[in-house]
Every structure is written in C-alpha cells, then in structure tokens.
Amino acid sequence: MSPAPGPGAIRLRTATAGDAGAVAALHRASILRGCVGDYSATQIRAWLAVLTPAVYPELIASTSFRIALEDDAVCGFAATTVSEEVINAVYVAPFAMGKGVGQALVADAEEALMTAGRHEARLNATLNAVEFYRWMGYVDVGHASNRLSSGVAMACVAMRKPLV
C-alpha cells in the first residue's frame, strides 16, 4: 500500500455534478488572472457571463472531466472529448498556477486518449496558454476562434500533438 499524499500534493479524480460550483468559481478566477491581458474587457465579460455552475453538469457527464485537488481544494480541471481526440479545456486556479497542476492535467488527458487508442491530441489554446502548450510538445496548426453563445468571438490557436 502506498502512503497517502502529503500536504500540498496534487491529486486527480473524475469530477461529479457536485463539483460544478467549485469548477465554475475556479474557471472564472483562472480567466480573470490569466486571460485579461490577451482579451478585451468586452470579451472577458461575455466569457464570464456564460460560466455559471449550471453549465458544468452536462459537460462533466459528456466528457472525460477530471479535477485536480490540493489539500481537498479544487485547483484545476480538464475536459476531454476522447472520441474526437480533443482536449476541450484546461484551467488552473490562481493559487495553483506554476505548481505543475496544468502539466498534470494535460498529461492525464493525453493518457486517457492513449488508453482509448487515440494517436493525437488536439486543442484550441487561449492566447495566454499557447507557450505552455508548446512547452508540453504541442505544435501550432493555425489561428482559430471560439464563438461564445453570445456571439462574441475569442481568438485562439489550434494546436496538436502526436501521442506515442
């Protein structure tokens, strides 16, 4: 039997609908901390407006949705559509940025894809995250845009990584 992780250790687990409130709060805080310099105030307001706890239970049920925990506090999440080889989202709480949480979540998503027999991971990186994904071995495919339900477009970079 392996010892329990020590204080500050990052654990990953599958999310449940009960995590929706914590995930929504983390998602909003992550955007406010990491994305403000790359998107306009109008884009940020439109983005935050759609991120209520009500939107997450369906996403949790329809994707491989994993959360990272540090001392039982939700500190990150990743949503992956395995059948499409797409990492839909990876966000890290401001208090956990730079601690390897994003790296652990991306590696976990890639492992889920490989376990399912997939050979590539694809994603649309927010502008602030492009360098992180390059560091993780992703290559730019081209410019892309994610359109919010409000119609507001969010520039991003389409990226891919072969999985071996």
Image: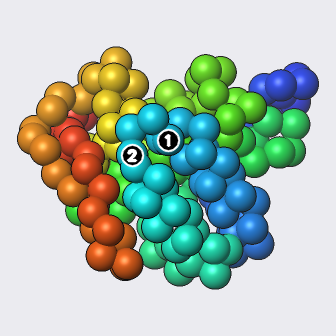
Front-most of residues 112 and 29: 29
Left or right side of 6 for 160: left
Residue 56, compared with residue 8, is above or below; it is below
Which mark is on residue 36? 1
Front-most of residues 147 and 7: 147
Q: Quadrant of the N terminus?
A: top right
Residue at x 38% of width, y 38% of height: 38
Looking at the rendered structure, the kind of residue marked 1 is Val
Looking at the rendered structure, the kind of residue marked 2 is Tyr
Residue 153 occupies quadrant: bottom left
Secondary structure under badge 2?
loop
Please state the horizontal and vertical placement of residue 106, each as a whole percent of the image: 45, 37
Residue 98 occupies quadrant: top right
Contact, mark 2 vs mark 1 (Cβ under 8 Å): yes
Secondary structure under badge 1?
loop
Left or right side of 69 for 124: left
Residue at x 59% of width, y 45% of height: 32
Please state the horizontal and vertical placement of residue 33, each as a whole percent of the image: 60, 38
Which mark is on residue 39? 2
Residue at x 55% of width, y 47% of height: 31
Which mark is on residue 68? none
Q: Quick one: label 2, few (<14), some, or many (20+) residues within 10 Å? A: some
Q: Quick one: label 1, few (<14), some, or many (20+) residues within 10 Å? A: some
Front-most of residues 48 and 102: 48
Residue 2, compared with residue 56, is above or below; it is above
Please state the horizontal and vertical placement of residue 147, each as a whole percent of the image: 28, 68
Give the CA separation, mark 2 to mark 1: 6 Å
Residue 124, compared with residue 96, is above or below; it is below
